[in-house]
Amino acid sequence: MISVIVRTKNESAWIGRCLSAVAAQNHHAFEIIVVDNASTDGTLDIASRFDCRVVEIAEHDFSFGRALNAGIRASRGEYLALLSGHCIPLNDQWLQCLRASFDDARVAGVYGRQEPLPDTDPVDKRDLWISFGIERRVQRKEIFFHNANSMIRRDLWERFPFDEELAGVEDRDWAKQVLSWGYRIVYEPSASVYHHHGIHHSQDPRRAERVVRVIELIHNTPRR
């Protein structure tokens, strides 16, 4: 079974389309867990229309890693698909495309392509197109990984849960850990989602400062 862990925070504009696309997947066995961070815009009312379980996390307890860990603990799947509530799978093959690479026991995690929507800000469009290309690749040293659209093995999460103290880019920290143990990360462009605001939020300087601090910490902290 695959557990789809969907993180939300005031995603009413997107969550219906997100969950509709997930529910339409052609994979034979999966469950949906929504992890909500104190939404106030009706996100949970929309989520209640779908066959999913909801895990709520308080604002003062939130970190990206803590939200993911809470959702995973509430799930049952051998494989864990991680998806942001404002990302929309392009087609009904999304889960299957993420899952396929795990036939190789050396693969710890897979992340998929992120594509802009027609009304996405041009800066975000540029960043998405530059960051997520059309060629599949296997990473042995490169720690780039992105939990807006990814899948990991549950048994490896049990060994390497997400760091709940990091203020972001917990995905790269996780990738650094598993790569240091000889595992591999796969970028699979066929497992694609629409991501309206992109990965850099139109170059928001406050977000950039936060991400830079965490990445510097990750690069300067030895693993194993």
Image: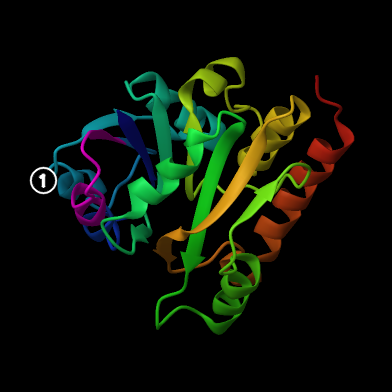
Q: From the viewer's perspective, tell me whether residue 32 is left or right of residue 102.
A: left
Q: Which element type, helix, strand or loop, lies under badge 1?
A: loop
Position of residue 218 relative to residue 180, above or below, is: below
Residue 217, image quadrant: top right
Residue flagged by tag 1: what amino acid is it? Answer: Arg
The residue closer to the viewer here, 70 or 172, is: 172
Q: Position of residue 195 (x, y in %)?
A: 44, 65
Which residue is the site of mark 1?
A: 49
Identify which residue is drawn at 43% across, 69% down: 196
Can you say which quadrant of the picture contains the N terminus?
top left
Q: Which residues are magenta?
A: 19-33
Identify which residue is drawn at 56% across, 22% down: 156
Position of residue 76 relative to residue 67, above or below, is: above
Q: Is residue 5 magenta?
A: no
The residue closer to the viewer here, 93 or 77, is: 93
Residue 184, image quadrant: top right
Q: Is residue 23 magenta?
A: yes
The residue closer to the viewer here, 92 or 196, is: 92
Q: From the viewer's perspective, tell me whether residue 209 is left or right of residue 67.
A: right
Can you say which quadrant of the picture contains the C terminus?
top right
Identify which residue is drawn at 25% across, 43% down: 27
Q: Residue furthest front?
A: 104
